[in-house]
Amino acid sequence: MKINQGEGRVGVLNLDTQNRVPIEHLDVGCDKPKIHDKVHYPKHYNVHPSGVECIEITRHHTFNIGNVIKYVWRAGIKDEDALLEDLEKAKWYLQDEIGRLKSLDK
């Protein structure tokens, strides 16, 4: 990445894609700056005070448990108005995992 000015805007040129990224989309509080975008590095996944990104935890769990962690982790952060919805989604995945485990015991 390199700082790039053009068309009156300051940004960072992503050398891999040659796309300009607005400077405000950078997280420079880490060893390697990360570009915030909705697909590759959403802000709501890295707001935990520990600095740990949610996926670093969830990838070590089953799909359902990973989703429980994800929805609790970001509850009310991605969308303040969706706090209850995020917790309901976490509950759904938890109940699904409980059901899956119970069916294995039969």
Image (spheres, grey):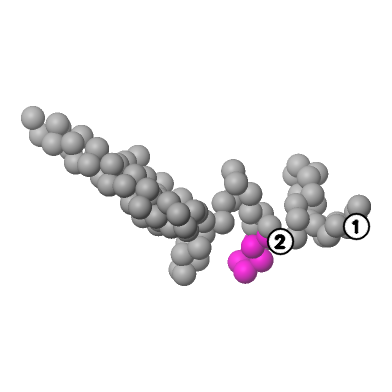
Q: Is residue 68 left or right of residue 7?
A: left
Tell me, yes or no, if residue 68 can be seen here.
no
Left or right: residue 4 compared with residue 32: right
User: Magenta stretch?
Assistant: 26-32
Judge by depth and name the residue closer to the eye, 104 or 79: 79
* Residues at marks 1 and 2 touching, judged by CB atoms closer than 8 Å: no
Three-letter code for the amino acid on which mark 2 is drawn? Glu
Q: Residue at x 22, y 42 (%)?
A: 95
Residue located 59% across and 51% down the image: 41
Q: Which residue is mark 2?
A: 24
Q: Residues within 10 Å of mark 1 (few under 14, many from 20)?
A: few
Q: CA distance from mark 1 to mark 2?
A: 15 Å
Crowding at label 2, few (<14), some or many (≥20) Cα neighbours within 10 Å? few
* Residue found farthest to the left: 106
Identify the residue at horizontal 37%, vertical 48% (top origin).
85
Mark 1: amino acid: Gly
Q: Where residue 39 sits: x, y (%)? A: 59, 43
Label 1 sits on a secondary structure element that is: loop
Magenta portion: prevailing SS class? loop
Q: Which residue is mark 1?
A: 8
**In the figure, residue 3 lies in which quadrant?**
bottom right
